[in-house]
Image (cartoon, helix red, strand yellow):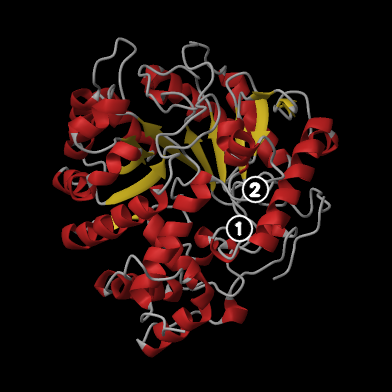
């Protein structure tokens, strides 16, 4: 695994930070995931190749995909999502 | 969307290296009494024997669950109520129990009220990562994070945080959001930025464990929460602060279309392993440790000194829990469009809110990850064309 996904993530975060929030009345955007990926590509964010991602289907989760697997070099590992209060 | 099968087969081979986090409960005791705490027995002063620490680490390695490095978080009670010398012994016991050359990384999540120079010495000595639990400015924090006598804890926590930073440690913060937090995004983010904390994780006040209600459980909260997120995101951008939830959800967009279709770290068996102070083994959501459910009984799966991984996999408690958890994940996959960015929710929330692991959406789902996903997507996408 290289640093490339980390760079893509940082680029994505920059795009999100610079973006304008959707109107409060806007319909949910969850159905537009592929459009979001295309938008990122158009903005120059280098998306990791799909075949390069670790995607092992449930229940073979020895290498199950999650943020930490996909971006092992990003800081704050583990990110304490599972540590509560 | 593919639907995971029910009761998928589990074995030592399929579970190899699965444990992303080993949570060790040095003690269940906590010196503060937060209004939203989920922990049963937090007034008990039991402590884990060093022999149990060793047995826990040995169990994870013997089971083949340990990745490299193995991350160990000391939590599920306030870890700093035990003295630094106890941790020196515990860390040595863990080291001795791990195979030669295996890497162990230790982390502590603390309310920071007990931090002293002696603690900072320990953290430096062993490269221990530190997170502090702080809810923002004093009025927000002290409303919920109180002593048993009812006093606020903000001043002590802030003193601890500042000492950590003066001593060159760089803690992240976990900030619990209740209903009263939602009007103060700029103040909360600004507080952390002013104190030099550059990495914030937002946990929502959840209904789980012994905390039977949430101030967020009210109509219309999703819209307020979304507004909070948007304002917090803008404030974080201005202040140069990272928000964990934003980073996670944005990162997951890069992993589509599969995303989290393999489940998430709370519903995949042994992704989290929690060993309670008495050596009992738990998995799935860490908050399940110590929980006795009216229908499922005590959720301990076995004991690190007595049971092998195979014993645990065969145990009625594990089999019942896993069958329900898998059914719940399958339900999420069938019914929720956010599944690729969530992976099937948190078993602890499902059990507390819905009475079963075999359930779908919860309050926590409707806030994080759903509103975070919408905030991220809303900033990426142009408005949808009117139909």
Q: Position of residue A25 (x, y in %)?
A: 36, 67
Question: Nearer the N terminus, badge 1 or badge 2?
Answer: 2
Q: Nearer the viewer, residue B98 or B259?
A: B259
Q: Nearer the viewer, residue B68 or B275?
A: B275
- Residue drawn at (17%, 45%), measured in percent from left and top? B187
- Residue drawn at (55%, 74%), measured in percent from left and top? B256
Q: Position of residue B60 (x, y in %)?
A: 67, 39
Q: Nearer the viewer, residue B60 or A84?
A: A84
Q: Chain of mark 2?
A: B
Q: Kindly identify which residue carries mark 2.
A: B267
Q: Nearer the viewer, residue A23 or B258?
A: A23
Residue A73 seen in render: no
Q: Kindly identify which residue carries mark 1.
A: B343
Rate crowding at label 1 as few (under 14), some (14 to 19) or many (20 or more) other CA atoms within 10 Å. Answer: many
Q: Position of residue B168 (x, y in %)?
A: 21, 41
Q: Residue furthest left?
A: B194
Are discs 1 and 2 less than 8 Å apart at CB?
A: yes
């Amino acid at each position: 695994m290289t640093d490339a996904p980390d760079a893509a993530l940082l680029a994505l975060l920059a795009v999100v930070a610079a973006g304008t929030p959707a109107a409060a009345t806007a319909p949910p955007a969850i159905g537009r995931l592929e459009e979001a990926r295309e938008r990122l590509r158009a903005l120059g964010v280098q998306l990791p190749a799909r075949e390069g991602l670790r995607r092992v289907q449930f229940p073979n989760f020895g290498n199950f995909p999650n943020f930490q697997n996909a971006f092992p070099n990003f800081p704050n590992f583990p990110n304490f999502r599972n540590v509560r209060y | 969307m593919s639907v995971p099968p029910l009761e998928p087969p589990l074995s030592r081979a399929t579970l190899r290296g699965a444990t992303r986090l080993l949570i060790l409960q040095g003690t269940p005791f906590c010196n503060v009494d937060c209004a939203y705490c989920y922990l049963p027995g937090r007034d008990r002063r039991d402590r884990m024997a060093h022999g149990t620490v060793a047995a826990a680490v040995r169990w994870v390695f013997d089971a083949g669950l340990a990745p490299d490095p193995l991350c160990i978080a000391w939590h599920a009670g306030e870890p700093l109520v035990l003295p630094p010398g106890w941790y020196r012994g515990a860390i040595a016991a863990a080291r001795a129990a791990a195979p030669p050359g295996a890497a162990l990384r230790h982390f502590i999540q603390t309310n920071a009220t007990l931090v002293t120079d002696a603690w900072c010495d320990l953290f430096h000595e062993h490269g221990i990562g530190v997170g502090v639990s702080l809810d923002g400015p004093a009025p927000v924090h002290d409303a919920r994070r109180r002593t048993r006598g009812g006093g606020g804890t903000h001043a002590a926590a802030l003193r601890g945080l500042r000492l950590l930073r003066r001593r060159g440690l760089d803690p992240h913060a976990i900030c619990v959001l209740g209903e009263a937090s939602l009007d103060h995004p700029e103040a909360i983010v600004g507080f952390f930025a002013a104190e030099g904390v550059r990495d914030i994780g937002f946990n929502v006040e959840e209904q789980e464990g012994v905390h039977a209600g949430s101030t967020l459980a009210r109509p219309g909260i999703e819209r307020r929460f979304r507004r909070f997120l948007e304002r917090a995101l803008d404030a974080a951008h201005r202040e140069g602060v990272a928000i964990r939830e934003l980073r996670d959800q944005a990162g997951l967009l890069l992993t589509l279309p599969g995303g989290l279709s393999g489940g998430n770290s709370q519903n995949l068996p042994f992704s989290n392993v929690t060993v309670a102070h008495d050596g009992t083994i738990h998995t799935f959501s860490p908050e399940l440790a110590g929980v006795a459910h009216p229908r499922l009984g005590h959720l301990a799966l076995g004991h690190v000194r007595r049971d092998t991984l195979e014993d645990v996999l065969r145990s009625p408690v594990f089999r019942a829990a896993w069958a329900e958890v898998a059914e719940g994940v399958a339900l999420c996959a069938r019914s929720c469009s956010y599944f690729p960015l969530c992976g099937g929710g948190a078993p602890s929330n499902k059990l507390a809110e819905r009475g079963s692991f075999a359930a779908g959406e919860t309050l926590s789902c409707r806030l994080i990850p759903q509103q975070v996903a919408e905030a991220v997507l809303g900033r990426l996408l142009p408005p949808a064309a009117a139909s």
